[in-house]
Image (cartoon, helix red, strand yellow):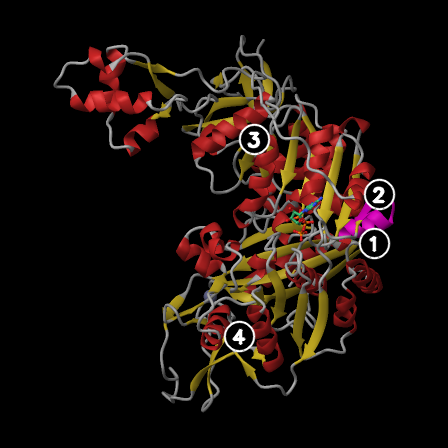
């Protein structure tokens, strides 16, 4: 009698499918199978085996198992099942996030052929007329390590030429780099970095990989050398057969970090991020699944991968909002990392100069070990931060005269400066000073940003764009002007003031145009005087030793926002961007322009003590009964009309009626219309997380059965980052 298995598909369905398991196909959870599905075939993942077959239904059989081992080993499988329940996202889609695209399509789980060819004969053996083959052979012979197919074509040779050499046995495949699981040997020649006494003190407080589960919050001020602490820790404590995971917010922004890890660990470093192609992804996945002793540096989704020998997790810049996925499976990479360490009985280290209030709260509650590193590495000192009130001061490109003077002085002293503007483009609004018209996005409840370089008006919330006009589109007046600051405008003003100094703009537009941020930053890395102008991108983890001045154009953005997280994010960004000043031997200075120089939060900022501000903010969160003191979840709806969206949420609200759970709304979202979709939300807030989880599971099950109007959608977001 054949047994029955329950199988998950990569579909947004809160249900699983039962199939017969033909004899001779032993299955276990996490294994990849091919199954008939409707009129097609699909790739599924086994969730349960030997289940009681449902009565009265004839089941179809599994067609085959794609491997005789589980693609998702037990611990990874448990992790994803937990995440599916915690974040209320369908199990199938959660499980498949840990499977690379090639395997989702049913491709075999083998290394993509990337053979290297070596020469093994002399060109003398070739006929005199075979010039091309001769050239190819000689070229291959110059590369002792062998050359890849792709390199051969890139060098201008062809496959038939290679084939001809192969037939004559003049070339052969070089020994593969990794022939079988566990076979990889990594030579690590460089010793651990030498740490300062403060760094050593911090490193010595970190629990060892074999001491079981623990979570540590490494609070290390900007420039304190946290990366060196991680390197030292891994070098000293990670056994040669073990795996480690280092999560980073965005790899492409900080190529320096990867380079630093590679210097110490060489080939043992593997990277995982969204820019990998399918075969790079598959090859990396196989190494991870095989238990190769790699150290993976990866973005958010790396935490879900099927490690089999994971002994340490590090989450760098743990406060960064990019750890939370904003759509679909809305998990927090940081929080999943903590749960993974718990499942895996190993340490997790969360590091930041500006820890999230969640993590800091956990540290204060004794759940996380708090480790402080409050000195800068090397000879660097913390920068001095001062507020510059700009009320009734004339501004140029957002810059006040004292700020311009400080920039001038910095350049004269042979140093570099950084100007932080929180908007890309030229100006966030174009306004007519005759009729008052402001140009809005036709598809969103937002204004269009003026991009002068491309003479375009763009919506930063959808992809709408229109050509810029010189006169008001409504009344044709010529008094049609940009209002507010964007990076382009500040760049122009700086170029006019400092014509002989390179101005380097870093924002999403400039990095998209010029390729990588690395190319753009080459100018800065020469150390010659220059001014960097840019957005948040500049605040993240960069190490420019010659930057001695940071100017923040306007600090007021998040001070009075309705989003309860806004002040936290503002302070984090301000301190992170301030932390780019004075990282080398020269002292750094930060000038923060504001119209609210008496605001208590900004005043505390000048002391530079993040934890003081965090204490202050936690006090406010507790008074307002917000996370981390309570658990929050948001039901969101979007539809073609606001009425429909509100209707969906109105129908959800009675289902949430539970003692101890507060429900706010439904209300239109802060940007109520985005890309012609009308959005609303219903907020659930409670001090009983378990009850909330149970409630959400039952509400989601109910909603799954309901039919809503075409185009209308509901979503659930647990521990939301954005609450507007
Ligand atoms: N022990 C040390 N001796 C000398 N220089 C050091 C030492 N440790 C780190 N550094 C240097 O100090 C600088 C800052 O280090 P790192 O980038 O690791 O700081 P960080 O704590 O990650 O900072 P941030 O949070 O601001 O990104 C780097 O240039 C690094 O090479
Ligand atoms: Zn828009």
Where is residue 349? Give x, y as percent: 74, 40
Residue depth check, mark 4 versus mark 1: number of the one nearer the observer: 4
Q: Is residue 219 visible?
A: yes
Please give the range of residues in magenta. Answer: 358-372
Contact (CB < 8 A) between labels 2 and 1? no
Mark 2 — residue?
367
Question: Which residue is painted at 29% across and 25% down in the image?
Answer: 139
Q: Which mark is residue 485?
A: 4
Give me the C-alpha separation between circle 4 and circle 3: 44 Å
Single out the mark in the foreground, 2 or 4: 4
- Compute the Cα span from label 2 to label 1: 24 Å
**Which numbered circle lies on residue 438?**
none
Answer with the quarter of the image where residue 576 lies. bottom right
Q: Secondary structure at mark 4?
A: loop
Above or below, 285 against 718 in this view is: above
Tell me the residue that label 3 is attached to: 266
| Relative to 202, 634 lies left or right | left
The residue labelled by disc 1 is: 660
Instruction: Report whether 179 appears left or right of 593.
Output: left
Residue in the picture at 82% in, 41% down? 201
Residue 234 placement (x, y as % from top left): 70, 32
Give the secondary structure at mark 2. Answer: loop
Point out residue 528 in the picture as x, y percentages from the top left corner. 51, 60
Label 4 or label 1, whichever comes before in sequence order:
4
As measured in the structure, the alpha-carbon distance from the residue carrying label 2 to the one carrying label 4 is 43 Å
Judged by depth in the image, the label closer to the viewer, 4 or 3, is: 3
Mark pair 1, 3: CA separation: 53 Å
Q: Residues within 10 Å of mark 3 (few under 14, many from 20)?
A: some
Q: Give the position of the C terminus as an image quadrant.
A: bottom right
């Amino acid at each position: 009698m054949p047994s029955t298995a329950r199988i998950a598909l990569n579909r947004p369905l809160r249900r699983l499918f039962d199939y017969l398991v033909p004899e001779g196909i032993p299955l276990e959870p996490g294994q990849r199978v091919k199954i008939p599905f409707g009129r097609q075939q699909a790739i599924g993942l086994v969730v349960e085996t030997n289940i009681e077959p449902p009565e009265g239904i004839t089941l179809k059989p599994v067609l085959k198992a794609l491997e005789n081992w589980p693609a998702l080993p037990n611990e990874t499988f448990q992790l994803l099942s937990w995440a599916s329940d915690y974040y209320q996202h369908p199990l199938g889609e959660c499980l498949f996030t840990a499977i690379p695209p090639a395997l989702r399509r049913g491709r075999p789980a083998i290394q993509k052929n990337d053979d290297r060819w070596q020469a093994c004969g002399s060109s003398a053996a070739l006929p005199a007329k075979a010039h091309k083959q001769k050239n190819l052979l000689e070229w291959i012979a110059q590369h002792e390590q062998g050359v890849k197919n792709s390199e051969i074509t890139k060098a201008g040779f062809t496959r038939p030429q290679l084939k001809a050499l192969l037939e004559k046995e003049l070339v052969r495949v070089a020994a593969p780099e990794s022939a079988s699981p566990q076979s990889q040997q990594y030579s690590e020649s460089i010793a651990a970095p030498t740490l300062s006494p403060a760094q050593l003190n911090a490193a010595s407080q970190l629990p060892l990989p074999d001491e079981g589960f623990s979570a540590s919050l490494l609070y290390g001020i900007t420039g304190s050398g946290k990366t060196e602490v991680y390197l030292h820790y891994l070098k000293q404590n990670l056994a040669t057969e073990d795996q480690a995971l280092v999560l980073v917010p965005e790899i492409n922004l900080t190529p320096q970090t990867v380079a630093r890890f590679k210097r110490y660990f060489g080939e043992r470093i593997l990277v995982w991020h969204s820019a990998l192609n399918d075969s790079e992804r598959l090859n990396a996945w196989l190494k991870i699944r095989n238990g190769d002793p790699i150290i993976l540096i990866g973005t958010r989704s790396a935490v879900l991968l099927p490690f089999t020998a994971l002994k340490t997790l590090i989450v760098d810049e743990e406060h960064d909002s990019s750890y939370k996925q904003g759509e679909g499976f809305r998990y927090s990479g940081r929080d999943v990392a903590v749960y993974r360490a718990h499942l895996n009985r190993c340490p997790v280290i969360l590091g930041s100069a500006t820890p999230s209030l969640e993590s800091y709260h956990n540290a204060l509650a004794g759940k996380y070990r708090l480790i402080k590193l409050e000195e800068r590495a090397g000879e660097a000192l913390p920068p001095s931060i001062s507020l510059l009130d700009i009320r009734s001061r004339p501004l140029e490109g957002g810059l006040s005269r004292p700020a311009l003077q400080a920039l001038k002085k910095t350049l004269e002293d042979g140093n570099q400066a950084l100007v932080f503007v929180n908007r890309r483009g030229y100006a966030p609004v174009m306004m007519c000073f005759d009729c008052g018209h402001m140009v809005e996005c036709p598809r969103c409840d937002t204004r269009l940003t003026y991009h002068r370089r491309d003479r375009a008006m763009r919506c930063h919330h959808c992809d709408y764009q229109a050509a810029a006009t010189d006169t008001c589109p409504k009344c044709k007046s010529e008094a049609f002007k940009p209002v507010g600051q964007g990076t382009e405008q500040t760049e122009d003003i700086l170029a006019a003031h400092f014509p002989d100094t390179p101005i380097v703009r870093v924002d999403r537009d400039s990095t998209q145009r010029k390729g990588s941020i690395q190319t753009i930053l080459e100018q800065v890395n020469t150390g010659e005087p220059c001014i960097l102008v840019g957005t948040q991108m500049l605040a993240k983890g960069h190490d420019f030793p010659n930057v001695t001045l940071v100017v923040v154009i306007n600090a007021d953005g998040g001070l009075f926002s309705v989003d309860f997280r806004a002040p936290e994010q503002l302070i984090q960004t301000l301190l992170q961007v301030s932390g780019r000043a004075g990282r080398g031997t020269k002292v750094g200075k930060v000038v923060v322009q504001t119209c609210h120089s008496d605001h208590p939060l900004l005043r505390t900022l000048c002391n530079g003590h993040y934890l003081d501000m965090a204490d202050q903010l936690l006090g406010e969160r507790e008074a307002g009964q917000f996370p981390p003191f309570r658990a929050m979840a948001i039901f969101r709806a979007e539809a073609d009309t606001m009425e429909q969206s509100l209707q969906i949420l109105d129908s959800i609200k009675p289902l949430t009626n539970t003692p101890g759970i507060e429900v706010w709304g439904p209300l239109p979202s802060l940007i109520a219309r985005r890309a012609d979709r009308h959005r609303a939300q219903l907020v659930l807030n409670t001090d009983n997380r378990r009850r909330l989880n149970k409630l959400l599971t039952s509400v989601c099950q109910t909603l799954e059965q309901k039919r809503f109007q075409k185009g209308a959608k509901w979503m659930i977001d647990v521990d939301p980052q954005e609450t507007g």
